[in-house]
Amino acid sequence: MYLYIVNKAQLKNNIMRNYLETLISEKGLDLEGTIIEVEGQDWGLNIIELGAVVDYIMASGTANQAKVKDTLVKIDFHNGDVMHFFKHVAKFMAI
């Protein structure tokens, strides 16, 4: 028998990642196959996989993740396009 000790931050990260992956799957999107194109200031066109955007969100801290989830829930509730939000996040990643 193994005893796993998980701190609260790890548990929240796992819950958030699961939420994002479930939402993406339900929308018929793919972490690796869905590509986002955004213009960067220095390099011009940036091609970013949706999975990289999810990783960026996961690295942003629990407070920001909570805001991301709240925003995505509102978008989903109103039958909006979550890709518009993910593209918005990708703009912060663009070089």
Image (cartoon, rainbow, N blue to C red):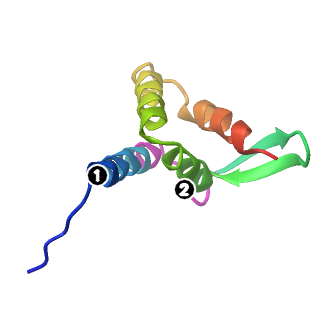
Q: Residue at x 24, y 60 (%)?
A: 6
| Percent coordinates x, y for residue 2 in the rendering | 13, 78
Q: Amino acid at mark 1?
A: Leu
| Percent coordinates x, y for residue 63 in the rendering | 43, 33
| Residue position for label 2 | 31
Q: Residue at x 40, y 50 (%)?
A: 17
| Residue position for label 1 | 11
Q: Which residues are magenta?
A: 23-34
Residue 29 in magenta? yes
Residue 77 in magenta? no
Q: Residue at x 61, y 54 (%)?
A: 52
Instruction: Please tell me how crowded label 1 is: few (under 14), some (14-19), or many (20+) other residues with Cα within 10 Å.
Output: few
Instruction: Please tell me how crowded label 2 is: few (under 14), some (14-19), or many (20+) other residues with Cα within 10 Å.
Output: some
Q: Amino acid at mark 2?
A: Leu
Nearer-N-terminus badge (1/2): 1
Up the image or down, 70 lies above or below 28; here it is above
Give the quadrant of the N terminus.
Answer: bottom left
Q: Nearer the viewer, residue 5 or 19?
A: 5
Q: Mark 1 and mark 2: span between their CA atoms?
A: 21 Å
Left or right: where does residue 12 sit relative to residue 64?
left
**Residues at marks 1 and 2 touching, judged by CB atoms closer than 8 Å:** no
Left or right: where does residue 74 sit relative to residue 44?
left
Up the image or down, 31 lies above or below 65; here it is below
